[in-house]
Amino acid sequence: MPPVSVTPYTSSKQRLINISCFIIWIAYALIQTALLWWFDVDVSLALNDSLISATVITLCCYVIASALNHYMPRRKGYFYIVIWTLVLAAISISIDRWILQFFIQDKGYLDHIDVSLPLRFFVNALLIAWMAIINILWNIQQEYKENEQRKADAERLAREAELYNLRQQLQPHFLFNSLNSIIALIGRKPDEARNMTFQLSDFLRGTLRKDDQQLIALKDELEHLQLYLEIEKVRFGHRLATQVDYDESCLAMTLPAMIMQPLVENAIKYGLYDTTGNVTIRVSCTCSEHLLEIQIENPYDSQSNKPRRGTGFGLRGVQRRLFLLFGRTDLLETKATTHIFTSIIKIPQR
Amino acid sequence: MIKAVLIDDEPLARSMVAEYLESYPEVDVVAECNDGFEGAKAIMQYQPDIVFLDIQMPKINGFEMLEIIDRQPAVIFTTAFDEYAVKAFEQHAIDYLLKPITKARFDQAMAKFLDTKQTEATAANTRKMLDSVQQAAGTLERVVVKTGSKIKIIPIGSVICLEADDDYVKIHTDEGTFLKNKTMAAFEEQLNPLHFVRVHRSFIVKVDHIVRLEPHEKDGHVAVLSDGQKVNVSRNGYARLKQLLGM
């Protein structure tokens, strides 16, 4: 299993390595000198031996730490760490022994060193392993911290999106204007007022109940849409006409809940709120065996509308949802002629 | 008689205000309008004492409509939900009614209006409010002007440069020159600073339309624009241009 490359951690990691190596060097030299002195070895011999051995083992520790700074082994890769530790320990002993022969002339003492080689190997291996463990633990902790951060970020994003959705669903402008219309109707046309109140509550209930992931039948989505259009007709009845065409065979087909709503709201926003004169909004649904296609058409005023903002948030949101659900980016299409804006969504059937 | 004009794109919303006004026999509704175009015409024609004005309307919104009217009438805004606008109203002590409008709140607004009528001070407040609303709305995307009896919507994309002209600003566009009653400072603040630069006390220029810069007199410059116009560039203006263009 090859190690995974990660970007080297910042200077705090480098500082950890430096400090550990320094401690190893001091401690190794001191302890070994003390031990040799305890065994009645000549002080200058003991110092020579200890300083050279300490330097060699420190260099080896530095090598493994630096390697782990750049390569983070996968879980199964820990086996390789053990092998590396043993190999490095063997190398450190060989180099140590090879250098020592130039500095120590006392033949008897060199023989003495050869006897202690297994012990020295064992100590070096332990030190290198300790260094490796410290580094791996640091990496794991760092990774954990980064994961936590990522999770927190993702949660924050999700919360913001949820808030935005809630506000979208409630559509304060639509809601308050509708209530205002109802109040205006109560005195003169109480029946219409009552009817509109029912429509508004049905519409709101439908909006709140639906969950984003759910697939619902076209029939239900069209009914929900009809409520919305009826309410707008009460507000703008004098100039709003709607035309909803569909093939009977398509009604059972499914689509993500509330996917049409932002498109129809867009159509109303640009087609009705931003134009004068009579307006017709057309919705037509066609289907084949594996595909449901919905086309929404509205007139718009190319003059008062700044050179068409391409895709507004509503359209982007629909595109994003379609991508998340179906993994395709070609399911939403928009067309604009001088007076007519058309958006088309395709829903693959499973 | 007090003349009133109702402007709202929803007939039912207008009828509600009209109904409330029935209890004020001294108020006469002289016109009901569906959008800002009709509204501006009616205001100029009838010179009403009070206008009930919705904000979100087709073509031009309530604020843009007020901008093109020379003599500001007393205005009571009626709106369903406009956070920015409401903040601006409160800052400049302009009265507004939130839909659905209760009779009690309506009466309160009427009492205030009947009490003070329109004074110079409130007209000035309206101007200031219009400026602050536009700032809150972000960068300017279009300008609404009146040419004779016609109302023209100028998309910012077609503007070449702006020239100060006493109390007015001359807007030079692809389609000709228009006058707008607004300050250069207000324009400078509301236009996208990546596209427009104030090159001189009297000129704001769209950077894309500068064809070349020529030295002029001692240490001044002149910018030649795509329509052949030559525009003075002050020393400060030249520095700003240099900074924006990374020269």
Image (cartoon, rainbow, N blue to C red):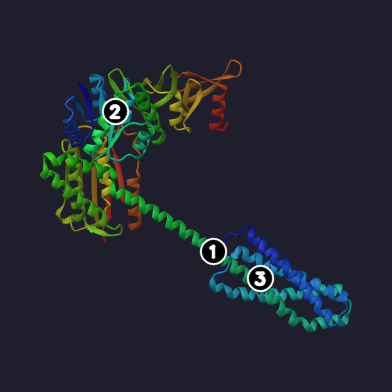
Q: Write down the residue under mark 2.
A: B75
Residue found 84% across the figure and 73% down from its top: A47
Is residue B3 positioned above or below A95 on the image? above
Q: Write down the residue under mark 3.
A: A131
Is residue A340 positioned above or below A194 on the image? above
For residue B49, which numbered disc appears in the image?
Answer: none
Horizontally, residue A281 falls left or right of residue A122, namely left
Residue found 30% across the figure and 27% down from its top: B65
Q: Write down the residue under mark 1.
A: A143
Horizontally, residue A210 falls left or right of residue A87, namely left
Chain bearing tag 1 is A
Q: Helix or strand or loop: what does disc 2 sit on?
A: strand
Give the image quarter of residue A193. top left
> Marks 2 and 3, how far apart in space?
78 Å
Give the image quarter of residue A69. bottom right
Badge 1 density bin: few <14, some 14–19, many ≥20, Cα 10 Å: few
Rendered location of residue A170, percent (x, y)? 28, 49
